[in-house]
């Protein structure tokens, strides 16, 4: 295995502040300098991944636990690959099959994991705020892999990394996020990173799924909300479609799937209103034919698979930065 010192383009530590955070719980408190540090470190990790061996030994002797109380494919698998690519030992735990099923509390669970040697716990939970509670109750670092409708910080970081690869700066770029904004942790965490990077963010969806509280003006970028997708998408540099959660239909928040598709599906006719090279994104999992047409999901400007691939490099960066902070 290679050591991180052998990276061709190591993060420019002399110009950027060192990472000092024990946990990564959301993107809302990350400074532009911290975002830059994650992006530069992720670029270095991408270079590591492109080598024939694709691994370094930086986290050798450290244990990363993935603790998932909800289903996941991308987040969980990419954290596991990321941790192993850095030489860490990985333990995967689900609520199903663990002592959580016998009624063990979250606090007892994370303390148990700490007692058996967990250095970092990557956690997904159905309740907003659960990773914050866990982080307050363990010396292990907690990384939020998605908590209820609240936050999904590493998804937003990998989305930012992907956008920057194609667009360079996000300054003044129009990014449209369309779908169930109200229940989307992805939309929330993306909003904070995009505002920090100076983007013009448009959140779009049925009025019942658009929380007005998100209308915001950051120091650099700004955010507006609209239920009109045809208007929102005009001139967009990036269009990110979100999964429509089928349970929303039962709760009466959308009239019917047919109506939803008519107003909010990202299809060829709508995409033609965006810039010709507009990036098509989706955090996954997708309902093809509902929120996004299959030809657009797999079209020329779709970067959906790149998002997934970049997830490994970005999660390697997050694990690496937190591990370096823990050693100080
Ligand atoms: N985007 C995302 O969080 O996907 P998973 O639910 O598969 O992890």
Image (tube, rainbow, N blue to C red):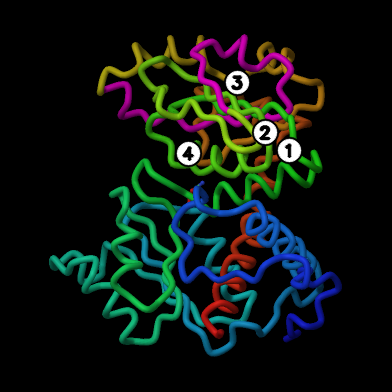
Give the secondary structure at mark 4.
Answer: helix
Above or below, comparing residue 176 to residue 95 in the picture:
above
- The answer to which of 201 and 119 lies nearer the viewer is 201
Instruction: Verify whether residue 258 appears in magenta.
Output: no
Residue 274 drawn at (x, y percent)? 73, 18
Instruction: Verify whether residue 232 appears in magenta.
Output: yes
Question: Which residue carries the number 4 mark?
Answer: 188
Question: Dot 3 surroundings within 10 Å: few (below 14), some, or many (20 or more)?
Answer: many
Label 3–label 4 contact, CB within 8 A: no
Label 2–label 4 contact, CB within 8 A: no
Question: Which residue carries the number 2 mark?
Answer: 199
Question: Which residue carries the number 3 mark?
Answer: 266
| Residue at the right extreme of this rendering | 8
Q: CA distance from mark 1 to mark 2?
A: 5 Å
Nearer-N-terminus badge (1/3) = 1
Comparing marks 1 and 3, which lies closer to the viewer?
A: 1
Q: CA distance from mark 2 to mark 3?
A: 21 Å
Give the secondary structure at mark 2.
Answer: loop
Nearer-N-terminus badge (4/1) = 1
Task: Tell me where the magenta segment starts and ends, as one range.
Answer: 223-250
Nearer-N-terminus badge (2/3) = 2
Question: Dot 2 surroundings within 10 Å: few (below 14), some, or many (20 or more)?
Answer: many
Label 1–label 2 contact, CB within 8 A: yes
Question: Which residue carries the number 1 mark?
Answer: 170
Quarter in which the N terminus is drawn:
bottom right
């Amino acid at each position: 295995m290679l050591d991180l010192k052998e990276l061709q383009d190591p993060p420019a530590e002399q110009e950027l502040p060192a990472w000092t955070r024990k946990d990564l719980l959301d993107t809302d408190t990350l400074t532009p300098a911290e975002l830059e540090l994650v992006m530069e470190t992720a670029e270095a990790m991408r270079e590591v991944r492109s080598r024939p061996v694709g691994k370094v030994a930086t986290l050798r002797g450290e244990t990363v636990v993935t603790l998932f109380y909800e289903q996941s494919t991308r987040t969980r698998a990419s954290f596991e690959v990321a941790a192993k690519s850095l030489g860490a030992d990985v333990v995967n735990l689900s609520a199903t099959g663990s002592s959580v099923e016998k009624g063990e509390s979250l606090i007892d669970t994370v303390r148990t994991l700490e007692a058996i040697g967990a250095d970092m716990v990557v956690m997904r939970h159905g309740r907003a705020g659960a990773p914050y509670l866990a982080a307050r109750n363990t010396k292990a670092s907690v990384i939020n892999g998605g908590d209820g409708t609240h936050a999904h910080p590493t998804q937003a970081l990998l989305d930012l990394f992907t956008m920057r690869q194609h667009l360079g700066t996000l300054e003044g770029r129009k990014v449209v996020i369309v779908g169930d904004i109200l229940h989307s942790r992805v939309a929330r965490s993306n909003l904070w990173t995009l505002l920090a990077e100076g983007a013009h963010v448009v959140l779009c969806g049925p009025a019942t799924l658009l929380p007005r509280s998100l209308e915001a003006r950051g120091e650099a970028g700004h955010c507006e909300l609209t239920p009109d997708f045809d208007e929102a998408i005009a001139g967009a540099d990036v269009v990110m479609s979100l999964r429509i959660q089928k349970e929303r239909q039962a709760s009466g928040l959308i009239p019917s799937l047919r109506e939803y598709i008519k107003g909010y599906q990202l299809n060829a006719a709508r995409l033609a209103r965006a810039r010709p090279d507009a990036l098509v994104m989706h955090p996954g999992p997708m309902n093809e034919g509902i929120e996004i047409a299959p030809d657009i999901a797999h079209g020329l400007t779709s970067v959906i698979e790149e998002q997934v691939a970049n997830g490994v490099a970005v999660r390697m960066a997050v694990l690496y930065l937190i591990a370096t902070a823990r050693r100080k």
